Image (cartoon, rainbow, N blue to C red):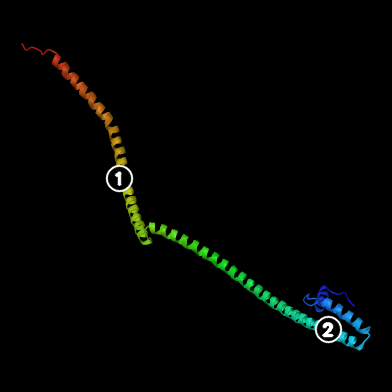
């Protein structure tokens, strides 16, 4: 025979002792009654001991039956607890799955909220600036004004170039006129000197 396990020892103990209400004492008493019955002298004493043994045996059988019922009930309770435990485990797994999904939804909701806030901020910035149509009109007006100013610049540059040429021509003429004017000035001085000399000399007298 193999080694006796703790469960078998407990089971045998329960079958013998029942719920701890003195089954060991009953069995001991039954053994003593059997010994007394074997050594009894008279028939009446033998019959009396026999009845006592039957009563004690009935009590032991009743206690054993009760113990078996309790044992079976405990087995059913254990199976029921195992079933409940599995259901609880399934519920916990389902709850964890739901929690993970809720966390995922919360992260998505936070991300969407962040995008919404960024969108609102960007929309406010966009609203503070003119729309594209007005901007294009302003840009077109600026391009036209720039073209006009460029034309004016070219006209002014042409005018300045003309004036510069005219100024150079005038300087050239003045440079050419300078010796003539200096010569005329010298002639005028000579003529003035001659006139002065004529005025100072005495006029001849007629005889």
Q: From the viewer's perspective, is 166 left or right of 121? A: left
Which of the pair 35/49 is nearer the observer?
49
Q: Of circles 2 and 1, which is in front?
A: 2
- The crowd level at tag 2 (other Cα within 10 Å; few <14, some 14-19, many 20+) is some
Q: From the viewer's perspective, is 156 left or right of 41? A: left
Q: Secondary structure at mark 2?
A: helix
Residue named by callout 2: 57
- Residue at left 14%, top 14%? 200
Which of the pair 40/180 is nearer the observer?
40
Q: Secondary structure at mark 1?
A: helix
Return the x and y of residue 83 as percentages of the image width and height.
68, 77
- Residue at left 13%, top 16%? 199
The alpha-carbon separation of the residues under discs 2 and 1 comes to: 145 Å
39 up-or-down from 112: above or below:
below
Q: From the viewer's perspective, is 154 left or right of 91? A: left
Is residue 12 visible in the rendered image? The answer is no
Q: Quadrant of residue 164?
A: top left
Is residue 152 visible in the rendered image? The answer is yes
Return the x and y of residue 143 as percentages of the image width and height.
35, 55
Q: Quadrant of the N terminus?
A: bottom right
187 up-or-down from 126: above or below:
above
- Residue at left 81%, top 74%? 10
Which of the pair 90/79 is nearer the observer?
79
Return the x and y of residue 43 as percentages of the image width and height.
91, 88
Q: Quadrant of residue 64?
A: bottom right
Numbered label attached to residue 189 = none
Return the x and y of residue 9 as percentages of the image width and height.
83, 75
Residue named by callout 1: 159
Farthest top residue in view: 207
């Amino acid at each position: 025979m193999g080694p006796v396990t703790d469960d078998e020892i407990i089971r045998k103990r329960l079958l013998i002792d029942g719920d701890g209400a003195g089954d060991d004492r009953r069995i001991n008493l039954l053994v003593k009654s059997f010994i007394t019955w074997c050594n009894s002298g008279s028939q009446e004493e033998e019959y009396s001991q026999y009845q006592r043994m039957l009563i004690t045996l009935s009590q032991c059988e009743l206690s054993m039956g009760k113990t078996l019922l309790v044992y079976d009930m405990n087995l059913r309770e254990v199976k029921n607890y195992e079933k409940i435990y599995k259901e609880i485990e399934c519920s916990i797994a389902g709850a964890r799955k739901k929690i993970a999904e809720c966390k995922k939804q919360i992260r998505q909701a936070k991300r969407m909220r962040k995008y919404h806030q960024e969108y609102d901020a960007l929309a406010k910035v966009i609203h503070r600036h003119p729309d594209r149509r007005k901007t294009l009109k302003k840009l077109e007006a600026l391009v036209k004004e720039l073209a006009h100013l460029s034309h004016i610049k070219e006209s002014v540059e042409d005018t300045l170039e003309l004036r510069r040429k005219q100024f150079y021509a005038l300087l050239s003429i003045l440079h050419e006129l300078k010796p003539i004017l200096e010569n005329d000035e010298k002639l005028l001085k000579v003529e003035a000197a001659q006139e002065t000399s004529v005025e100072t000399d005495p006029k001849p007298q007629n005889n």
